[in-house]
Image (tube, rainbow, N blue to C red):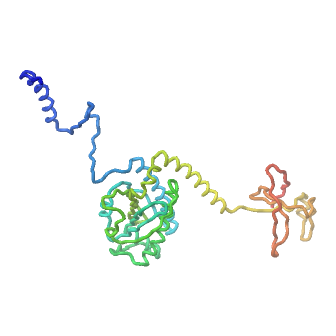
Amino acid sequence: MSMLDQNEIDSLLSAVEPVEEEQHGSDGPQIFTRSRVDIEQIEVRQYDFKRPERVSKDQMLALESLHETFARNFGASLSGFLRTIVEVRVAACEQMTYGEFVSGLPNPTSYNLIQSDGLEGQMCLEISPLIIYPIIDRLLGGTNQDLFIPQRPMTAIEQRLISNVLKRGLTALSEAWESVLPLKFEVVAHESNPQLVQIVPPNEVVMVIGLEVRMSSRAGTMNLCIPYNVIEPVMGDLSSQSWFAVKRTDDDAMNTDRIAQNLNQAGVGLSAVLANTTITLRDLSEMQVGDMLVTTQPATEPAVILIEGEPKFLAQIGQHSNKRAAQIIRSISKGERVDTSFRD
C-alpha cells in the first residue's frame, strides 16, 4: 500500500478547507444532491409530517368546484323552503387531521353523521348554532329580531325541524356528486358534542369544506368533513381533466332534462276550427239571433286543433259528460296543407 507524503496531504487539505468554510459560513438552507444546483432557483417549503398532504391540488380544486355546485343548489332549495333569500357559498376547502377539525368546533353544535350507499365509512356535517336557531325561528314564524342563541343541545322538536333542512341539504349533495358517482346520502346519527364522535383516528387526514350560510341579517358556518379513506376509491375521478370532462357532459344532460320538465309544465293555448266561410260586411252587420251560417265543410268532417295558433291535430267534435269535447283522430304531418283561414 502506497503512503502519501506530507506535501500531498497539505495539498489535499488546502483544497478541502475553503469549501468547508464556505458551507459553514452560509446562513441559508443547504441542499444535498448528486447534481450541482443553484439554490436561488429552487423553492424550499416546510413539510409537516404531522399533517401529510395526501390530496393533490388538482383534486382539491375539483372537490371545491364540486361543492360549489352543492352550495348553489342547497341555497336555492333553502330559499324556497324558508320563503326568504338564503345564500350558501364555499368559504374554504382544506385538508387537516380529524383531531384538528374537531378541536375547532363549538360545543354544543349540530353534529350529524352521514353515510352513503356507495362509499365505505361515514362523513360529518356540522352546522353552527348561529344559523341553526335563526332557521328554526323562521320555520316557527319568527322574524329573527333580537333572537337569543341558547347554549344548549337542541330539543327533540328542534331536531325534527332541522331534519327537514338536512334532507334538502343531502339531496343537493347527491345532485352535486352525480357528476362523479351516483350517491345517496342519509343521516345516521346526531350529536351535540363533537368530542364524543370518533369516526376516524385523530391523526387521520380529512378534507373539510367550510361553507358560509347567510339568511337576512343572520349568518353562520357549515362544515362538511370527508375522511380521506372514505373517498379514496373515487379520488382518481377527481382529477381536473377527467372530472371537468364528465361534469360538462352530465351538466348538459341534466340541463336538458330540467328544461324538458319545465316545458312539460308550461301552459299552452288550445283552440279548434270547426268550419270556415266568407260573408259580406253588410251581412255581418245585419246578422241577428237565429240566423244560420252555411259553410262548405260537412258536419262529419274532422275539426282542426290549433296549439298556440298552429295546426297540430285533427279531431272529431262531440260531447262527453254533457260538455263539449274533441276526440283526437290523428296528428297533422309536417308540410300537410290544412285550411285554417278562420281561427277561433
Residue in the foreground of this view, choosing between 126 and 181? 181
User: In the picture provided, is 121 more to the left or to the right than 323?
Assistant: left
Quadrant of the drawing holding the N terminus = top left
User: In the picture provided, is 69 more to the left or to the right than 50?
Assistant: right
User: In the picture provided, is 64 more to the left or to the right than 323?
Assistant: left
Quadrant of the drawing holding the C terminus = bottom right
Residue at 42% x, 47% y: name it: 58
Residue at 79% x, 56% y: name it: 311
- Name the residue furthest front: 1
Question: Which quadrant of the structure image shows residue 2?
Answer: top left
Residue in the foreground of this view, choosing between 100 and 33? 33
User: What number of labels is visible?
Assistant: 0
Residue at 44% x, 72% y: name it: 162
Query: Eyeballing the image, is 194 above or below 253?
Result: below
Q: Position of residue 161 (x, y in %)?
A: 46, 74
Question: Which quadrant of the structure image shows residue 210?
Answer: bottom left
Q: Position of residue 322 (x, y in %)?
A: 82, 75
Residue at 37% x, 71% y: name it: 191
Question: Which quadrant of the structure image shows residue 39?
Answer: top left
Q: Position of residue 317 (x, y in %)?
A: 85, 66
- Name the residue furthest left: 6
Q: Position of residue 261 (x, y in %)?
A: 63, 60
Query: Eyeballing the image, is 243 above or below 98?
Result: above
Query: Eyeballing the image, is 56 above or below 294?
Result: above
